[in-house]
Amino acid sequence: MQPPLKYPSDGDVRRLLRFAPEEGAIWLGDRRMLLMHTASMAALRQDLIQSMGMAQARRVFTRMGYTSGLRDAEFAQKCRPGRDLRESFLVGPQLHMLEGAARVTPLKMAFDPDSGQYSGEFQWDDSWEAYAHRQDFGLAEEPSCWMLTGYACGYTSAFMGRLILFKEVECSACGHDHCRIVGKPIEDWPDGEAYRPYFEADSLLDQIDALSQQVEALRSTLAPAKPEGSLLGQSPAFLRAYDLLARAAATQVTVLLTGETGVGKERFARTLHELSDRRAGPFVAVNCAALPAELIEAELFGVEKGAYTGAHATRVGRFERADGGTLFLDEIGELPMPLQAKLLRALQEGEIERVGSECVRKVNVRLVAATNVELERAVHEGRFRRDLLYRLNIYPICIPPLRERVGDIELLAQALLNRFTALHGKRLRGFSERALQALQHHPWPGNVRELENLIERGVILAGQNEPIEVEHLFPFSPVPAAAGLDPHGQLTRLPDRAETDLFEHLLSSGVTLEEVEHRLLHLAVDRAEGNLSAAARLLGLTRPQLAYRLRHGGSGDRSVPSSS
Ligand SMILES: [Zn+2]
């Protein structure tokens, strides 16, 4: 006979729940939750029953419950590592209660993880779903806690690693005193197979999926060519820039790419090249800011042997190397003035001269220039030729910053994740929901390049087979203030992680409370440069309180001097 089934303290489970009203979010671990009215769930339930019929509605709600059970099972091991199996398992019923489903009383539980054997029996009191059903439909003929039962199936199946089917054998919607569920592996139920469709992909949804894929395929044959190659995006801002790029590709026009640093100008230039009829020719990229001014002319236009000291051999310049293809000049605003005249001539006449040579060479090059500075202002300041600006500015394309392409962030992040997991030989379980949300809220001053760096760091920091968490992406950013539940179910402010770390560190360092107070008081006085009133404000004390504590070596009560 088993000892009576009692719940371990639910402090660990409660700590998973975090209310972050400033973010407009509620989190259970890294899973986003929703606090909604049971009345609205009941209304949805009633609508589905009336529009789809009892059987389909039951299926939908069972699957909803199943999904949240699967999700919650992720916490079982994390919450109670190293505890016995029954205590780990009870995370599920305790979470189900915390989430407000019903009061769950375990009646029987037996399992053997090695053989996958499981049997369980639970009682529910005050199930929200039984109540909703009776309110809308009166006394039910069959047990009606579909979503709750789905949860039990999902949670237990994920916990046991095989499909465990729970059936509700009594239900208060039918007039019983309680609801009661019984679960065991689906194969052990004589009629188990009849229930399997509840937990497999919905055939109706499959059909809708297949149809929508067909529609998508048809639509793509009508729409202009979709972004390919290394350019990824579907946001309106991205598609506008891409559309301009695709139209320019069909012509020989000189293109000027503008936009903030890190938006991916070279990728746009390369894509333009690949979309153009020059794609079989070379693509040559030069960063004008990366070359010293005295070398850049030889680099671009080539040099004849003996043209200057050190020119030991004739060298072909980037213009000639790009013949028949595309030359990409990044940071064109950094090009020295004398070279700007030479570039203008190359553009206008299609002719260049190597350094130290009188011989004029014809080149057939499409120029794509890029800048992250205002060329107009550079013209005003006399650093850039107006005629060259006019020549370059025939077809400007502004590449939007990442913060204006929020809809593309997840897409880009997933693609980068694939790239870096392959590169670093990692297997990761994607991004946590909180991490994805943090990516979408970041202002991205460094744009796509910053995103690349962050994802690569995240891939390196995340543990094998774990998801990438916020802390892996933004290790130094503070977690915003949040509230959790205290043991009485009241919302209470949660200490942030840095604070908790600090106090844990202090506690294990063996330093005394008196020492901590002494150091803290003197730190405040130092920081206030000896001004006691200012130091007191830093500490949330009055000046006399601070003076008293300083005199008495840090001991004593805040308001009333201690008598001991
Ligand atoms: Zn019930």
Image (spheres, helix red, strand yellow):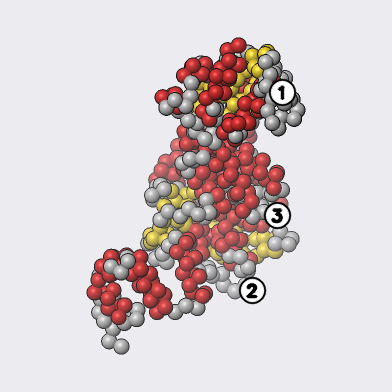
* In the foreground, 33 or 120: 33
Q: For the residues marked 1 and 2, what is the alpha-carbon distance in whole angstroms?
A: 96 Å
Identity of the amino acid at label 2?
Met
In percent of width and height, residue 265 lies at 57, 30
Q: Is residue 58 left or right of residue 300?
A: left
Q: Earlier in the sequence, mark 1 or mark 3?
A: 3
In percent of width and height, residue 136 lies at 41, 43
What's the residue at 28%, 74% (across, down)?
A: 546
- Residue bearing mark 2: 1
Q: Secondary structure at mark 3?
A: helix
> Which class describes the residues within 10 Å of circle 3: few (<14), some (14-19), or many (20+)?
some
What's the residue at 71%, 48% (across, down)?
A: 425
Which residue, as the protein is rendered here, is positioned at the far right? 313
Q: Is residue 421 left or right of residue 122?
A: right
Q: Is residue 232 left or right of residue 502?
A: right
> Which class describes the residues within 10 Å of circle 2: few (<14), some (14-19), or many (20+)?
few
* In the foreground, 312 or 189: 312
Q: Earlier in the sequence, mark 1 or mark 2?
A: 2
Identity of the amino acid at label 1?
Glu
- Which quarter of the figure has residue 182? bottom right
In percent of width and height, residue 94 lies at 51, 61
Q: Is mark 1 within 8 Å of ligand 1?
A: no
What's the residue at 46%, 41% (across, down)?
A: 443
Q: Is mark 3 within 8 Å of ligand 1?
A: no
